[in-house]
Amino acid sequence: MAYRRLQFQCRPAEPPLTMVTFALQHALEGGFSARSLKLGNIVIHLVIAGLLFLLFRALLAALVAQGKLRCDPGWVAALAMGFWLLHPLHVSTVLYAVQRMAQLSTLFTVLGLLLFVRWRSRWAERGASPQEVVAAALWLLLVTVFAVLSKENGALLLWLLPAVEVAVYRGRWAGPAAVAAGGCRLGAVAVAACSDCIDFLVRARDVSGGYAQRNFTSRSGC
């Protein structure tokens, strides 16, 4: 059986954290089977759904506290989580063993957003000490590293954090919104976007050459 050796021919190398989960599963079960690999992916999918519920509820609660929304955060978050959990789009991700890398990257990205929103909601009401901000930044950096080690697009967490800041908090700190802080964060988003575009233009050949490592052919079997 192909699952016994776990020979994923579609990519030259799987992300290291993804391979660690496969190695642990192999060690615990003494081998691989289609059923166990799919079951593992389903468990990860359920964990992500739980994190999304907490994230949606925290975001909605922050907007309700600011008077921008009038709704029950719990019910709306549960509905949104249910749509995500049962959406047919995720069938190919959950039931293909090799797509665990996408699941793990999503898990750590959502976890990072949840941590940021919880800290940021608290800071919007009562502020925070420099030590607390540094500790939060280190935790978010660690989660980002785990997301990238799961799949490269986990680096998008660094862009999603300022997007949440601009969309929800807008520089709010210990009460009223700080206009100057909000302007700084908007500037940070603009700088990040411009630097990304410049990086792409400078390394266009390297970026396009990276696709040579992915053989999207009928032989991939993934």
Image (cartoon, rainbow, N blue to C red):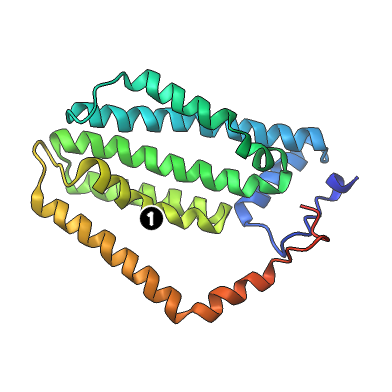
Q: Nearer the viewer, residue 27 or 94?
A: 94
Place of residue 117 in the rendered image (x, y in percent of width and height, measured from the top left): 31, 38
The residue indicated by pointer 1 is 158
Q: Number of marks in the image? A: 1
Q: Residue 49 location, x and y as percent?
A: 52, 30
Left or right: 214 with respect to 121? Answer: right
- Callout 1 crowding tier (Cα within 10 Å): few <14, some 14–19, many ≥20: some
Extreme residue toward the right, this view: 1
> Does 82 sit left or right of 29 as displayed?
left
| Residue 195 point in image, percent of width and height | 34, 71
The residue depicted at 37 percent of the width and 20 percent of the height is 74
Please state if 204 lies on the left or on the right of 61 as rendered: right
Task: Please tell me whether residue 59 is drawn above or below residue 214 in the rendered image.
Answer: above
Q: Is residue 48 above or below residue 1?
A: above
- Give the amino acid type for the residue marked by disc 1 in the picture: Leu
Residue at x-position 11% and y-position 38% = 174
Label 1 sits on a secondary structure element that is helix
In percent of the image, x 65 and y 42: which residue is there?
93
Residue 125 versus residue 67: which sits nearer the camera? 67
Query: How far from the left and from the top, in percent, is residue 96?
Result: 72, 43
Q: Nearer the viewer, residue 50 or 145?
A: 50
Q: Foreground: 92 or 181?
A: 92
- Splitting the image into 4 quarters, where does residue 218 fall? bottom right
Q: Is residue 18 visible?
A: yes
Q: Quadrant of the N terminus?
A: top right
Position of residue 95 relative to residue 10, above or below, is: above
Along the horizontal axis of the image, is 196 left or right of 222? left
One can see residue 141 in this view: no
